[in-house]
Amino acid sequence: MEQFLAADEDVKEDGQVDVDFFGRPVILTRKGGKIYAYVNVCTHTGGPVKRDGGCFKCTWHGSTFDVESGKALTLPAEIGSKLTSIPVKVKDGKIYYVYP
Ligand code: FES
């Protein structure tokens, strides 16, 4: 099974698209042409992150996260803690969540 999230063309390189996923905020982004999707809840105290250059940056206290792994790179989030990734695939110009 799969769940539509966004049009592929709407997620630009180094950009972001925020979607509601069954009541949870999910952030979609693209790096190196590949789509990444995470539940948008910082591992520190739950703030939202935004794409900021080559990483995600938390809008509450400034922790940064690696786009490809979702791992925290800087405090105050625990270094190495991870944003929850969402498995996605692109089909016919649309990005879908793929149920495991
Ligand atoms: S909630 Fe993200 S760094 Fe504090």
Image: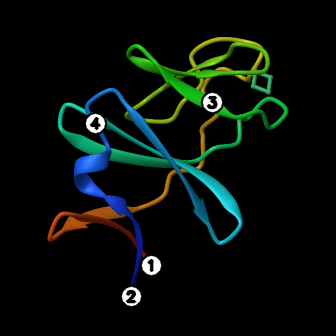
Q: Which residue is mark 3?
A: 49
Give the left or right position of residue 7, taking residue 17 as reference. Answer: left
Give the left or right position of residue 90, taking residue 81 as reference. Answer: left
- The amino acid pointed to by label 2 is Met
Image point 67% across, 16% down: which residue?
63
> Does dot 3 land on a helix, a strand or a loop?
strand
Q: Position of residue 22 (x, y in %)?
A: 65, 72
- The amino acid pointed to by label 1 is Tyr
Foreground of the two, 90 or 78? 90
Of the image marks 4 and 2, the number of the one nearer the N terminus: 2
Q: Residues within 10 Å of mark 2 (few under 14, many from 20)?
A: few
- Quarter of image, ligand 1: top right
* CA gap, disc 1 and disc 3: 24 Å
78 w.r.t. 88: above or below = above
Which labelled disc corresponds to residue 12?
4
Foreground of the two, 80 or 25? 25
**Residue mark closest to the camera, 3 vs 4:** 4
* CA gap, disc 2 and disc 3: 28 Å
Tell me where residue 17 sits by quadrant.
top left
Evaluate if marks 1 and 3 touch, with contact meaning CB atoms under 8 Å apart: no
